[in-house]
């Protein structure tokens, strides 16, 4: 039984990674096809680094994701602090509304925003409102719920007397927030910021409906590429991104393990004393 | 003091109003007006022609969610059985594909399944002959399962990992067979994870427009494909808005039905 389960799990992982493996192989393929390997080469990587447009698009994607994640993190953390202090029925109502961009299909979120921009454009009699600003506004909008939903549980876990204790010890309310509350909820804020960043970086569906011709991102361009034969340098970019993300995730994992060990050790010291 | 802290939420509430609530009202406005801004029911009336498309989309998404659950549940369970350090690595491996371009990964799936694709090349090399794997509903389902399976495994794992081992031991001590432990203890306790996983697969699957375009044939156009073409090729914003409105209502009804099963407990979507 256990052995069967193990084999099944390995097959599931193989299913998840087979297409990724194909794309990695294609990045070293001298032919342009995904289905046939004609010979090994690094040519696609040279092509990738010579392509300023593609690197520009990648920088665009990173710019939008960083800005959107930063804005959403500040707005969302402030919002969570405020919402947390509200009475239950109000809080529940706001949190339900906060869930809308998560539960709504992406295509509906994208279309609702694009219609809003079209509507405002019609009112202001502007030909095309779509561009960098609309893209950023849309990204902040779908990032906000992830930040709020990551910070709220941390606020719930907070010891209610923490703030009072800080105030009793002579901190001003603002000092108390930055020195006592903020460090406690920081893990939630960081999770929210990271989730927002990755959501933004990989978003295609919503961006597709609100981007303008003068500012595009990588996923949108990849979509346009997939209508015609995909140049293999895209596979090279995919491969580099894959290994970069893998390394970042492993590093974060190791840091987390070290952190936990340290905390356990500190706990052991306190409890043996 | 307390009221001043509440004010921190003000900018967000304004944002929520302008960029979430108002846009939905704009969708309703466009759905009920024609290109000149006159009120009309014609857009929604025209939905009748698309009923088969809506039905197909719902069916394919439901099948995908069911398959994801059948594959995802044992996988999530197996991951929780692994030692802690390996468990974290396995979860990382589940999350990693979620961060990679789904467009390219879907394209790789096409390369596997197409007529001159890898699977067919293998089949013909061993003398079994070529089979049409692509351009059929089953290929669309395969694409959905492949893309959204991680979204099923993650919430299932987060529920299963919190499961109290003592409960299982207690059930075994009281004479439950392994099957009964699974059916009477583990499964009921993982309902919130199942609901959240099914939602996270069903909602994007029912509204997808890329997967069906690449893996499906001309007969398997889904709601998402039609909405996309209304906006991007035929520029009929009003018809697109009407369709989005119907899609949104369908999704909300489905979610409402599913949330019935969880009762009052909050479903953790993250």
Image (cartoon, coloured by chain):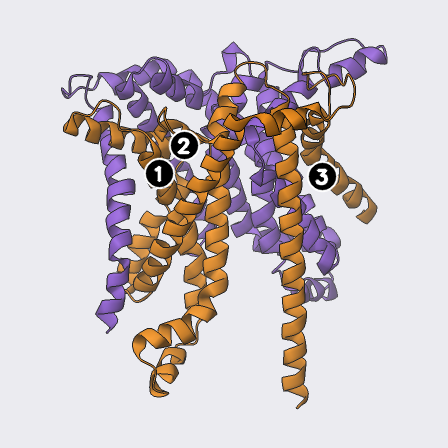
Q: Residue furthest bottom?
A: A273
Q: Which residue is pictured at 63% across the width and 85% down the height?
A: A270
Secondary element type, mark 2: helix
Q: Which residue is pictured at 62% across the width and 51% down the height?
A: B157
Report the side of A88 relative to B78 (left or right). Answer: left
Select label 3 or label 2 by which is in front: 2
Which of the two labelled residues, at mark 3 and mark 2, occupies the earlier sequence position? 3
Asked if one can make out residue A204 in the rendered structure from this viewpoint, the answer is yes
Is A195 in front, or is B90?
Answer: A195
Residue A246 to residue A266: above or below: above
Q: Measure the alpha-carbon separation of dots 2 and 1.
A: 7 Å
Select label 3 or label 1 by which is in front: 1
Which of the two labelled residues, at mark 2 and mark 1, occupies the earlier sequence position? 1
Q: Measure the alpha-carbon separation of dots 3 and 1.
A: 34 Å
**Residue B112 picture location, percent across and down:** 69, 21
Q: Measure the alpha-carbon separation of dots 3 and 2.
A: 30 Å
**Residue B133 appears in which quarter of the rendering?**
top right
Q: Which chain carries label 2?
A: A
Q: Mark 3 lies on which chain?
A: A
**Residue B148 picture location, percent across and down:** 57, 35
Residue tagged by mark 3? A13
Residue B94 to residue B28: above or below: below
Residue tagged by mark 2? A207
**Residue B107 picture location, percent across and down:** 61, 22
Colour of chain B, in one word, is: purple
Question: How would you rate the neighbour count of disc 2 (Cα within 10 Å): few for under 14, some for 14-19, many for 20 or more?
Answer: many
> Quick one: quadrant of the C terminus of chain A?
bottom right
State whether discs 2 and 1 lie on one chain. Answer: yes
Is B108 in front, or is A86?
Answer: B108
Residue tagged by mark 1? A138
Q: The orange chain is which one?
A: A
Q: Which chain carries label 1?
A: A
């Amino acid at each position: 039984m256990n052995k069967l389960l193990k084999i099944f799990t390995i097959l599931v992982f193989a299913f998840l990674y087979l297409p990724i493996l194909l794309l990695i192989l294609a990045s070293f393929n001298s032919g342009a096809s995904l289905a046939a390997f004609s010979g090994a080469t690094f040519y696609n990587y040279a092509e990738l680094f010579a392509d300023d447009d593609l690197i520009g698009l990648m920088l665009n994607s990173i710019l939008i994701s960083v800005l959107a994640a930063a804005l959403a993190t500040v707005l969302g953390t402030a919002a969570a602090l405020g919402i947390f202090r509200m009475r239950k029925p109000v809080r529940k109502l706001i949190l339900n509304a906060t869930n809308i961009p998560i539960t709504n299909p992406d295509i509906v979120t994208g279309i609702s925003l694009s219609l809003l921009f079209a509507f405002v454009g019609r009112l202001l009699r502007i030909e095309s409102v779509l561009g960098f600003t609309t893209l950023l506004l849309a990204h902040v909008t779908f990032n906000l719920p992830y930040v709020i939903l990551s910070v709220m549980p941390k606020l719930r876990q907070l010891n209610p007397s923490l703030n009072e204790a800080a105030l009793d010890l002579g901190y001003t309310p603002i000092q108390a927030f930055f020195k006592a509350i903020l460090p406690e909820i920081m893990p939630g804020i960081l999770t929210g910021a990271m989730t927002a960043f990755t959501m933004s970086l990989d978003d295609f569906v919503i961006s597709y409906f609100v981007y303008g011709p003068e500012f595009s991102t990588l996923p949108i361009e990849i979509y346009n590429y997939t209508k015609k034969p995909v140049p293999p340098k895209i596979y090279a970019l995919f491969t580099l991104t894959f290994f970069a993300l893998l390394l970042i995730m492993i590093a974060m994992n190791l840091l987390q393990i070290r952190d936990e060990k340290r905390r356990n050790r500190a706990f052991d010291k306190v409890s043996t004393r | 003091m307390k009221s001043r802290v509440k004010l921190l939420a003000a900018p967000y509430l304004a944002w929520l109003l302008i960029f979430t609530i108002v846009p939905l009202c704009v969708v309703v406005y466009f759905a009920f007006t024609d290109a000149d801004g006159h009120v009309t029911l014609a857009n929604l009336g025209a939905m009748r022609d698309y009923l088969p498309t809506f039905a197909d989309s719902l069916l394919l998404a439901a099948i995908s969610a069911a398959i994801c659950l059948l594959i995802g549940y044992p996988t999530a369970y197996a991951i929780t059985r692994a030692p802690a350090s390996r468990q974290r690595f396995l979860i990382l491996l589940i999350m990693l594909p979620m961060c990679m371009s789904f467009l390219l990964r879907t394209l790789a799936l096409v390369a596997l399944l197409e007529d001159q694709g890898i699977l067919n090349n293998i089949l013909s090399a061993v003398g079994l002959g070529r089979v049409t794997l692509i351009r059929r509903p089953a290929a669309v389902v395969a694409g959905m399962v492949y893309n959204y399976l991680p979204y099923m495994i993650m919430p299932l794992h987060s529920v299963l990992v919190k499961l109290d081992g003592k409960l299982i031991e207690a059930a075994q001590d009281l004479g439950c067979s392994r099957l009964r432990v699974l059916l009477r203890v583990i499964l009921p306790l993982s309902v919130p994870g199942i609901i959240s996983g099914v939602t996270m697969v069903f909602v994007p699957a029912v509204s997808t427009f890329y997967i069906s375009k690449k893996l499906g044939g001309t007969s398997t156009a889904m709601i998402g494909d039609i909405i996309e073409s209304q906006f991007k090729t035929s520029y009929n914003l009003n018809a697109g808005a009407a369709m989005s409105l119907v899609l949104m209502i369908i999704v909300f009804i489905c979610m409402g039905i599913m949330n019935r099963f969880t009762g009052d407990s909050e479903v953790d979507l993250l």
